[in-house]
Amino acid sequence: MALARAIPHRLASIGSSPSRRQGDSRGRIWSVPPDCVCLLLLTGMTAAILAFSGCSRASSHAATSSAGYAADSIRVERRNFSHTVRLHGTVEAVQSKNVIAPRLSGQAASTMIITKLVKNGVRVHRDDVLVEFDRQNQMKNVLDREAEYLGLVEQIKKKQADQTAARAQEETDLKGAEVDVMTARVDMRTNEVVTGIEAEINKQNLAEAEARSKQLKETVALKHEAAAADLRILEIQRDRAKNAMVWAQSNIEKMTVKSPLDGLVVLTPVYKGSRYVDPQEGDEVRPGSNMMLVVDPAAMQVRARVNQVDMSYLQPGLPAEVRLDAYPDLVFPGIFDRMGAIGTTSSYSKQIRYFTAFIVIRGSNPKLLPDLTAAADVEIQRMENVLVVPREAVITQRGQTVVEVWHDGRREMLPVKIDAMNDCEVVIESGIEEGAVVSRNPRLTGPPTPLLPH
């Protein structure tokens, strides 16, 4: 505000400067346009506001502890110091189950129609019905597979009966061939008493009967193998039809999807038309597509990204505070749980890597829902009852860390030894005492800053 009040006086002095008037060959008086004055005023006020709002706690404390000194001074006091790392991410459940549209057995992928669907955000218990699909096609498929199976069973019975009749005929033919062989052998015994021609005929008849019997046996064996193969083909077709029937019956049961655990239902949006919307009854979905997520709201965590530079500070077990972007007034305690082992490349630079971190949230609230964006302040260092000054109050001069201390109305640069620091504050280990007044923005050169009246 002192800067804002000083600007109009400075502009007035510039406007009435004799050198300015003498430099004008036409004798005109130099002046500053009103719009420039407004712009400079606005710039000065903005800079002052930003300077005072950088670290809110230190600024508000300076206004009450440095009365009677320079406007940018602050009294050194002992208080608790905390160094945190802020991580940004999204809220998710520690325990959750993804519910997908059922994959149907024994058939190619096809669409299914939703006939019943729970509402988004409904609390469900284990084995509660989440979604039901139209089962008419599956019921028709069961009837078709059952008819096919029963038809193959009847075909097998008929094939077995035909093969039984064929074996009886084959056995009769084999017996006849054996009788012919025995008859021809009996006729061979008369070769000594019959003529040579008849004896030769008997030999030919015996050879022919034996050849026929041998050929008939080989043919019957091949027929048995072919009949067994034919029967086996039908049996395989019957088994496949039976499996298809069983699969079709199981597909009917899959048309009803139940909750795998107690929790909260979070529907997965689907692309419809030109935008993503929640699925609803009557929609068609493909088997295996994501339908919803059942989460346990009793245990939530934040999945955040960590820059590789901050990895060395973060260790499991560190305390944290979690704030929801949607509900800034809600603050949840948390614990830094773990960090992923594989990093991802930044979209800005290939040399920068980000890792996934998990912060477990303690406590619950109806507003604590999955997919909400959140910020987690992980406390990596905490010190009790230490001397703390603003970070901008400490500078380096001639290789030494110094602060500007006010003593009897004058400024004095004193070397100090610092310990820890965060984005806004520095812990002073030695060099100044509690109650000393230091400048927030010390100057290395120039006259001392004038004192404000008491």
Image: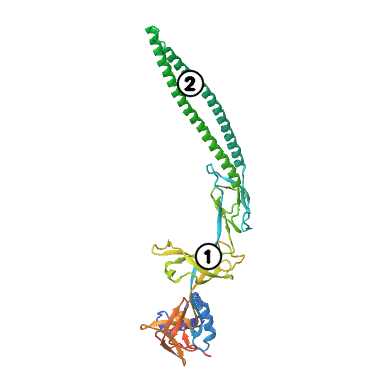
Q: Residue at x 47, y 25 (%)?
A: 223
Q: Which sits earlier in the primary sequence, circle 1 or circle 2?
A: 2
Instruction: Tally the numbered discs.
Output: 2
Tell which of 382 and 54 is nearer to you.
382
Please rate how many residues cluster around mark 2, counting C-alpha atoms within 10 Å: few if below 14, some from 14 to 19, many from 20.
Answer: some
Q: Which numbered marker is on residue 302?
A: 1
Image vertical order of residue 266 relative to residue 2, above or below: above
Q: Position of residue 139 (x, y in %)?
A: 61, 41
Which of these two is toward me, 200 or 139?
200
Say if 207 sits above or below 311 in the image: above
Q: Quadrant of residue 342?
A: bottom left
Q: Is residue 28 visible?
A: no
* Image location (x, y in percent) of residue 226: 47, 28
- Amino acid on which disc 2 is placed: Leu
Find residue 174 and name its label: 2
Residue 186 in view in this figure: yes
